[in-house]
Image (tube, coloured by chain):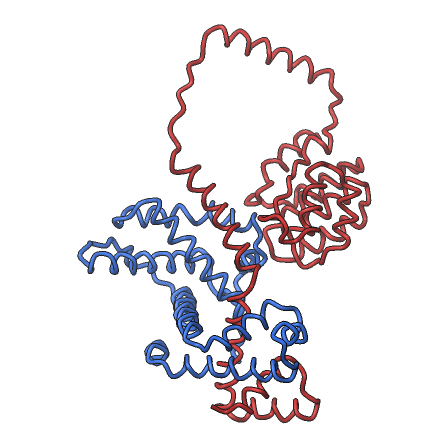
Chain colours: A red, B blue
């Protein structure tokens, strides 16, 4: 076994080489196919080791398991529901509809941000894995947005899901420009939050009572987006 | 290096890497029904489909985390192929190939085939790696494990009560030894070809 070789691989990967050694090393990588193959193998084993002992992997598995359980329990045992609708309920239902109708007539016609903004954060699958994340999640779900914002500010910005909830919290505390900057980043990125970001941009405009802007943004939401139906409803309500 | 055109479905892979619940949920909503149907029509039940899906997602996650994964075909085609072949393997294992399989013949997409092949290949290497890791000496296993769960090599040295220089050298040599054991195993040679 060539110990010197492995030691040089390691110091290259750890970026601990002097610049002269590094240039030599990289030159050999380009010119010597055998050397390159050896190095690539060493690097993959290093990555596999990192993955083997990664705590993130365990929380991924747990999260996956939860989602899988939920999905399969929902679809596996779906039985047709038998509802016995008793006649007197018709009367009650009818008067309820009447009541609601009257109530709506007396309501302000303008749809409100709070009618449409309903999000709950679930980005922590396990307690203690990331304490700040858990705190931010709980604060968000308890609608303590300004406190949530100060926790979000401390967190890194590489998690799109976290950024999404950060932006919503900012809208809630009326820091619109910052919120919209984050939403624009999400919109330009490529995650499931791409189109959801547009939806929240529209809601941000609604909250600021910029109705024309809101309408314009809503029209950008494509029909395959998750929030399309809600966007259409809001558009209708705005007219 | 060949220029790779990344498919727009890459966000599923990125979401998996980030352990993003909404992405994982979306994968189940959109792609699990097809897998369920396939397993059901081929001597399996929902519980089997559930396991297949979960195992395939873990393999994809591991590959993406370890070596990076750039999707060059629709996620649907790639994911379904992996699930399908995983299930066919399970069937072969349990019944010595006496079951009849309904193949949805005609459906072949080259890019998806190539991607699925690469992922299966990675999975083979990873399981060989796991097997070889168990065969490493105890000291090597300990040093390697500590190097990856401890923040700095200085801390590792302190925990093992040795010098920093020693622990660094030991880590390189143990990783090298493991690399060599993998390459020299017969299984590696059969995967390679």
Q: Which residue is drawn at 71% across and 46% down?
A: A136
Foreground pick, A237 / B30: B30
Residue A187 in the image: above or below residue A21? above
Residue B62 visible here: yes
Q: Quadrant of the C terminus of chain A?
A: top right
The percent coordinates of residue A153 (x first, y second) are 77, 53
The percent coordinates of residue A74 (x first, y second) are 44, 37
Foreground pick, A135 / A203: A135
Which quarter of the picture shows residue A139? top right
Residue B139 in the image: above or below residue A226? below
The percent coordinates of residue B9 (x first, y second) are 52, 58
For residue B140, side relative to residue A23 (left or right): left
Outermost residue to the front:
B161
For residue A62, side relative to residue B119 (left or right): right
Q: Which residue is drawn at 49% across and 66% down?
A: B63
Residue B70 visible here: no
Outermost residue to the left:
B98
Number of numbered discs visible in the structure rendering? 0
Which quarter of the picture shows residue A206? top right
Q: Residue at x 33, y 46 (%)?
A: B37
The percent coordinates of residue B154 (x first, y second) are 68, 75
For residue B103, side relative to residue A182 (left or right): left
Which quarter of the picture shows residue B68? bottom right
Residue A114 in the image: above or below residue A202? above
For residue A166, side relative to residue A190 (left or right): right
Q: Which residue is drawn at 53% across and 80% down?
A: B1
């Amino acid at each position: 076994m060539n110990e010197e070789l492995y030691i040089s691989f390691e110091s290259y990967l750890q970026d601990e080489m002097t610049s002269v050694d590094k240039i030599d090393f990289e030159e050999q990588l380009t010119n010597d196919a055998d050397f390159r193959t050896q190095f690539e193998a060493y690097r993959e084993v290093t990555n596999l080791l990192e993955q083997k002992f990664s705590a993130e992997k365990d929380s991924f598995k747990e999260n996956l398991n939860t989602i899988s359980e939920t999905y399969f329990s929902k679809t596996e045992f779906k039985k047709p529901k038998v509802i016995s609708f008793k006649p007197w309920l018709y009367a009650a239902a009818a008067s309820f509809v009447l009541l609601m109708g009257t109530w709506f007539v007396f309501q302000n016609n303008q749809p409100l941000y709070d009618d449409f903004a309903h999000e709950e954060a679930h980005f922590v699958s396990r307690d203690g894995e990331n304490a700040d994340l858990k705190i931010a999640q709980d604060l968000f779900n308890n609608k303590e947005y300004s406190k949530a914002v100060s926790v979000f500010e401390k967190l890194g910005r590489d998690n799109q899901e976290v950024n999404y909830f950060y932006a919503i919290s900012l809208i809630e505390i009326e820091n619109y420009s910052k919120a919209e900057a984050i939403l624009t980043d999400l919109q330009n990125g490529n995650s499931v939050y791409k189109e959801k970001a547009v939806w929240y941009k529209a809601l941000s405009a609604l909250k600021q009572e910029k109705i024309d802007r809101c309408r314009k943004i809503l029209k950008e939401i494509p029909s395959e987006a998750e929030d399309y139906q809600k966007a259409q409803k809001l558009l209708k309500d705005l007219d | 290096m060949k220029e790779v055109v990344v498919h727009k479905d890459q966000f599923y892979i990125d979401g998996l890497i980030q352990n993003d619940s909404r992405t994982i949920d979306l994968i189940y909503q959109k792609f699990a029904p097809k897998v369920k149907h396939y397993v059901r029509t081929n001597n399996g039940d929902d519980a089997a489909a559930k396991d297949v899906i979960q195992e395939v997602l873990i393999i994809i996650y591991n590959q993406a985390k370890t070596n990076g994964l750039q999707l060059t075909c629709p996620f649907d085609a790639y994911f379904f192929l992996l699930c399908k072949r995983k299930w066919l393997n399970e069937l072969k294992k349990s019944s010595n190939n006496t079951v009849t399989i309904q193949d949805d013949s005609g459906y072949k997409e080259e890019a998806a085939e190539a991607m699925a092949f690469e992922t299966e290949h990675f999975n083979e290497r990873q399981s060989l790696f796991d097997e070889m890791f168990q065969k490493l000496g105890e000291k090597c296993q300990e040093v390697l494990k500590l190097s990856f769960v401890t923040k700095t090599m200085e801390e590792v040295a302190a925990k093992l009560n040795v010098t920093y220089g020693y622990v660094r050298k030991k880590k390189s040599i143990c990783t090298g030894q493991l690399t060599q054991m993998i390459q020299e195993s017969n299984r590696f040679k059969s995967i390679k070809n």
